[in-house]
Amino acid sequence: MSWIDAIGQAHGRAAPDARIVSLVPSITELLFDLDLGERVVGRTGFCIHPRERVANVPKVGGTKDVKLDALRRLAPAHVIVNIDENEAPTVDAIRAFVPNVIVTHPNAPADNLALYWLLGGIFDREAQAEALCARLQAELDACAARDWPRETVLYLIWKKPWMTVAADTYIARTLALVGWIVTAPAGGERGAARYPVVDDLDTEVARVDRVLLSTEPFMFRERHVTELRSRHPQQPIDLIDGEMTSWYGSRAIRGLAYLREFRAARLA
């Protein structure tokens, strides 16, 4: 039996003692939730959950600057990467000395169902994957059960330059589940197409129904909300937990519950 990853590669069942390195923060967390923590022998510095358990897992650099020599010394049987988070040349270099490179690319919360089965199947954790699927489906159903009023939102992820997310992103599709619709910047998309630069912030803030400042990748805080509110006192502006809207894997289960409560509180 085999399992197919995001680029069509077939993967067979891993050995019971397979050594795993994850180069994707949300997938590192997922591996632990699949009861695979004892097999995780490497991670990036951004793989911070579950905090108390990853502390002793060796780091191999970041998602974009993987230290290949450090990775090689860990002798992994499997390395898990993501199309958006890891650089293609780095992934190609890893393939030269790692037998199995599993490529992931969830584009919407529902895609996590297939992700759970992919990793659960390869690493013999079908029961755990099935349990996670049931929990996620319950959260997806709960989102769909409510008729959310539609609002356009500006979801800011960076400052200097100001940057937002395009509609063709996991974040935008997550927000859409509670009626928040991401719109393209008024002046068109400059910079990375999926994460465009906002050239005129004041114009952009004024043309949407709500502004959301994410706590990651830029660490927006309440002081940034206060600053922006002083410029736009009539505009709803909120700080939102970026891990809950952008992390896939098992975090998506908690993320959807958080997002439903967050949106509902603003409708009260």
Image: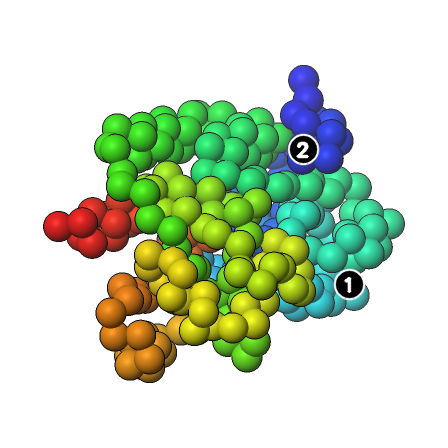
Which of the 4 image quarters holds residue 57? bottom right
Asked whether, in this view, residue 198 is left or right of residue 179, the answer is: right
Horizontal side of residue 115 vs 221, given as left or right = right
- Horizontal arrangement in the rendering, residue 67 relative to residue 157 (left or right): right
Q: Please say whether residue 94 is visible from this viewpoint.
A: no
Q: Label 2, secondary structure: give it.
A: loop
Secondary-structure class at tag 1: helix
Spot occupied by residue 98 in the image (x, y as percentages of width and height)? 79, 47
Q: Residues within 10 Å of mark 1 (few under 14, many from 20)?
A: some
Residue at the location (51% across, 73% down)? 200
Quadrant housing the N terminus: top right
Farthest left residue?
268
The residue carrying mark 1 is 68
Relative to 53, does residue 143 appear above or below in the rendering? above
Residue 172 place in picture, x, y as percent: 47, 48
Q: Position of residue 188 (x, y in %)?
A: 61, 59
Residue found at x 63% / y 41%: 104
Amino acid on which the number 2 mark rests in the picture? Asp
Q: Is residue 113 visible?
A: yes
Residue drawn where x is 25% and y is 52% of the image: 262
* Residue closest to the eye, 156 or 88: 156
Amino acid type at mark 1? Leu
**Residue 72: x and y, percent?**
77, 58
- Residue 5's mark? 2
